[in-house]
Every structure is written in C-alpha cells, then in structure tokens.
Image (cartoon, grey):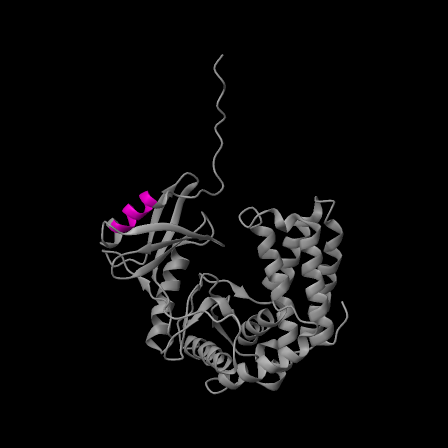
C-alpha cells in the first residue's frame, strides 16, 4: 500500500549554500569559485560569501518580513550616511546596479541584499575610548539622518508601536499558553507605568529622525584607526534619538552579570554621552528619561521574540526564559529608574 503524501507549505526554509553561492556569483559577477556558507539565523538568514579578494555577507529576508521597497530605501539611506561620514558595511549593487534582488524559495519569493564585510574587531567589554567612539558614531547617524528625505517605508518607534502594539503582541502570544500566561501581568503593568512616566512629557520636543533600530555593541566593529564600522541596519526606522541611546546603554548594562546596574550605567553613560554630545546635543530632560526608554525597548523586544520564536527556538516558551526577562526588567526599574514594578 502506497503511503499518502501530504502537501504542506514551508514557513521558513534554509537554502542550499552551494546553489545560493552560484546564484550570487551570477547576480553580482563575482568569482565562480566563491565559497558560500550559512552563517546565522537571526531576524533573517545570513550567509557568508568568501572570494580570494574579500568577504561579503548576504542578508536573505524572511518572506513578507520587509518589502522590496523598504530594503531598497535602506540601501539608499546607507549610501547617504556613508557620504556624510558614517563608516558602515556598504551594500553592494548587482550587475544591473540594483541593491535588492529576489530568490525563489519553497515558501515563496524572498528579498536579498549583499553587504561588504565590516572591518575591525568586536569589543564585548567597552573601554572609555570605545564608548566615546560609539557615542560619536551614533550621533553622526542621527545628525546626518535629519537631512534625509522622508521614507514612508520605515516603521516608527513611537509609543504606539513600542508600548501599545508590543503589549498586544505579548498578550496574544501568552493568551493560550497556560504555563506562561501569568507573566502577562508584568508586561501589562510595565506598559501602564511607561505610559504614565512618558505621558508627563511633551515628547514632540525630543530629537527625532532616522535611527539604526538596533544600535548595540555587537553591531559594529572597531578598526585599527579607532573608528567604528556599523552594520545590521535591518531594523532601520524613525524614532526618538534618546530611545536609540537607551537601547545601547541599557543593553550594555543588563547583559552583564553584576549585582547593581546603576554604577555601571552611570559610568558607561558618562563616556558614551561625552562622545555623543561632541557631535549632537541632547537635553537634560532626554538624559533623565534614558532609563525609562530602555524599559520601552525591552517591552518592544519581548514582542519581537514572540513574533519570531519559531526561528529563535522554543526557549521563548519556557517559564525560566520569561522569569529571567521579568527579573532583569524589575532590577533595571528598581536600580536605575528608582521605580518598582
């Protein structure tokens, strides 16, 4: 008896590196002897391409993750930033001069974009010089971006998106998962507190413009010349500059195994803001709200995890994962913000 074969489509596939390498060679006119290898699955799939001359990285987007137009506009903005003195991993045009091309995968058509490899070395334990350089680099991104044309294709990192919509995403994710459903109470309380704190200020007065979207220490390299080369603009959008500053400083502190976040936060923020303010000013009011904006970032990031847990493994379904995230959030609120959650 012949077994029946069910026809089921794919949500997300991993493409064959060898065949993808051949397609890349043809699309970009690179050496047919290049080596293509799977590098990382994050928000999207990353492949490393090595030729005898240099290395590249291909970002292969999930189907329907971002539009062709959005990724093309990202490439335009990266070129504008480069022209304005920001060192970054440059997008590479194909043989027809296009920055974005498409790949047919089992789940449908996926958008792809090729970047040169960022030069330099990672520095997971920033020293004062690196912190100042990180601040200068982010300030250059913010200052130059204010002169760019409006891009309707990018998301807005505002309270509607980062608090209201993120809470809705987290609540819906937990709703039918009885073993972790109770943790939704913390995020509801967090959203309420954030709306209360941020609602006391006129945020329209805060600096706003194009932002990297995920400016954290692992998304740039430090070169021999002491300058940072930035990469991974996949979350590019519009937001308050203080939100992006908070993302960097908060991430740097919270991902350290220390007993008290506040002393480290005060130290790293001093050097980072010293570098930042050598390029771009920031008000005292904005500085005071950096810790609160980092909590907003954490709520938004938890929603990202909920949307992509299928790709990032089922660790996001475990009780310990949710307890860990809540524990970190409560500590940050208590030790740095002086608020109890």
Quadrant position of residue 340: bottom right
Q: Is residue 162 left or right of residue 171?
A: left
Quarter of the image that includes the C terminus: bottom right
Q: Does 231 sit above or below residue 335?
A: above
What percent of the width, then of the height, locates residue 264?
A: 63, 78
- Which of 203/59 is in front? 59
- Residue 36 visible in the picture: yes
Q: Does 71 sit above or below residue 270?
A: above
Region rendered in magenta: 18-25
Q: Main secondary structure of the magenta part?
A: helix
Identify which residue is drawn at 48% across, 23% down.
5
Q: Is residue 49 left or right of residue 64?
A: left
- Which of 201/78 is in front? 78
Q: Is residue 118 left or right of residue 128?
A: left
Q: Does 236 sit above or below residue 264?
A: above
Quadrant position of residue 114: bottom left
- Which of 199/260 is in front? 260
Identify which residue is drawn at 47% across, 76% down.
138
Q: Is residue 5 left or right of residue 188?
A: left
Q: Residue extending furthest top?
A: 1
What percent of the width, then of the height, locates residue 15?
A: 39, 43
State the count of labels: 0
Q: Does 211 sit above or below residue 20?
A: below
What percent of the width, then of the height, locates residue 237?
A: 48, 66
- Residue 199 visible in the picture: no
Residue 24 falls inside the magenta stretch: yes
What percent of the width, then of the height, locates residue 122?
A: 45, 69
Residue 214 falls inside the magenta stretch: no
């Amino acid at each position: 008896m012949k077994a029946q074969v069910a026809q089921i489509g794919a949500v997300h596939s991993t493409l064959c590196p060898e065949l993808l390498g051949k397609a890349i060679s043809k699309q970009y006119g690179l050496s047919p002897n290049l080596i293509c290898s799977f590098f990382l699955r994050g928000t999207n799939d990353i492949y490393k391409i090595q030729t005898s001359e240099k290395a590249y990285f291909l970002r292969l987007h999930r189907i329907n993750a971002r539009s062709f137009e959005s990724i093309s506009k990202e490439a335009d903005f990266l070129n504008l930033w480069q022209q304005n003195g920001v060192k970054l991993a440059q997008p590479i045009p194909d043989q027809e001069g296009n920055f974005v091309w498409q790949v047919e995968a089992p789940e449908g058509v996926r958008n792809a974009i090729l970047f040169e490899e960022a030069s330099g070395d990672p520095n997971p334990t920033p020293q004062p010089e690196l912190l100042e350089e990180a601040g200068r680099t982010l300030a250059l991104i913010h200052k130059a971006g204010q002169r760019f044309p409006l891009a309707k294709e990018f998301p807005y990192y505002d309270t509607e998106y980062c608090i209201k919509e993120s809470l809705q995403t987290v609540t819906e994710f937990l709703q039918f998962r009885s073993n972790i459903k109770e943790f939704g109470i913390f995020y509801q309380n967090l959203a309420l507190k954030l709306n209360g704190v941020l609602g006391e200020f006129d945020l329209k007065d805060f600096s706003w413009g194009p932002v990297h979207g995920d400016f954290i220490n692992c998304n740039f390299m430090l070169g021999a010349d002491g300058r940072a080369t930035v990469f991974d603009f996949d979350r590019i959008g519009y937001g308050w500059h203080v939100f992006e500053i908070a993302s960097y400083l908060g991430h740097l502190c919270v991902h350290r195994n220390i007993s008290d976040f506040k002393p480290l936060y005060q130290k790293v923020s001093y050097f980072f803001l010293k570098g930042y303010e050598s390029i771009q000013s920031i008000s005292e009011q904005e500085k005071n709200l950096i810790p609160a904006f980092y909590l907003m970032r954490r709520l938004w990031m938890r929603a990202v995890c909920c949307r992509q847990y299928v790709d990032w493994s089922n660790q996001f379904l475990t009780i310990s994962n949710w307890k860990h995230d809540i524990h970190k959030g409560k500590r940050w609120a208590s030790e740095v913000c002086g608020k109890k959650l």
